[in-house]
Image (tube, rainbow, N blue to C red):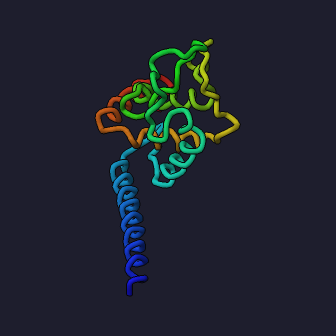
Amino acid sequence: MTRRAPIAAAVAVVAAIGAAGWNAAAQQATDVESLTFLGKTVTAAQLVLGQEDYAANCASCHGANLEGQPDWRRRNENGRMPAPPHDANGHTWHHADRQLFTITKLGVSAIVPGYESDMPAFEGILSDDEIVAVLAFIKSTWPERERGFQAEVTANDEGGS
């Protein structure tokens, strides 16, 4: 009986963690039912893919929790800006969907010619669908106010969707 108690407790803890994770994922899916990117509704599968691709390709610079690098508003010794946060504290949500997609695929200089950045262009690394998924995941984490502002910017963007 004594041996079974710790095993039963461990199983209960694992089950509770699993249920909490499932509930959080279900809540996120409910919260983003109306989320769009480039004019198309975002699916739960895209958010899962986006979260995985973000972790594999973006988190090393932009942070596992989208928090960005320290002193992200101050230039590094090389004159370049550190990676900004992608959460509500940053400025990602100030940009239209089309701009975010272009920056991610082709690099910042595609939007601001001559701008030098440590961020690589992800063309050839991530497919267009993967880029959309990553950006949809980032967008899904923003509070309603930031999402609303970004939706207006996207709607007003010439050439955006």
Q: How many labels does the image show?
A: 0
Horizontally, residue 11 falls left or right of residue 131, namely left
| Along the viewing direction, whichever of 104 and 89 lies nearer the viewer | 89
Horizontally, residue 29 falls left or right of residue 72, namely left
As drawn, the residue found furthest toward the left would be: 145
Query: Residue 53: x percent and y percent?
Result: 57, 45
| Residue 117 in sight here | yes
Query: Residue 44: x percent and y percent?
Result: 46, 54
Query: Residue 123: x percent and y percent?
Result: 67, 34
**Residue at 42% across / 74% down in the picture?**
11
As drawn, the residue found furthest toward the front would be: 2
Query: Residue 130: x percent and y percent?
Result: 59, 44
Tell me which corner region of the image, top left, top right, bottom left or bottom right, holds residue 36.
top left
**Residue at 53% across / 44% down in the picture?**
133
| Along the viewing direction, whichever of 10 and 151 lies nearer the viewer | 10
Whether residue 99 is situated above or below residue 32 in the rendered picture:
above
Whether residue 107 is situated above or below residue 60 in the rendered picture:
above
As drawn, the residue found furthest toward the bottom would be: 1
- Placement of the N terminus among the 4 image quadrants: bottom left
| Residue 129 in sight here | no
**Residue at 57% across / 12% down in the picture?**
79
Whether residue 15 is situated above or below residue 21 in the rendered picture:
below
**Residue at 40% across / 43% down in the picture?**
140
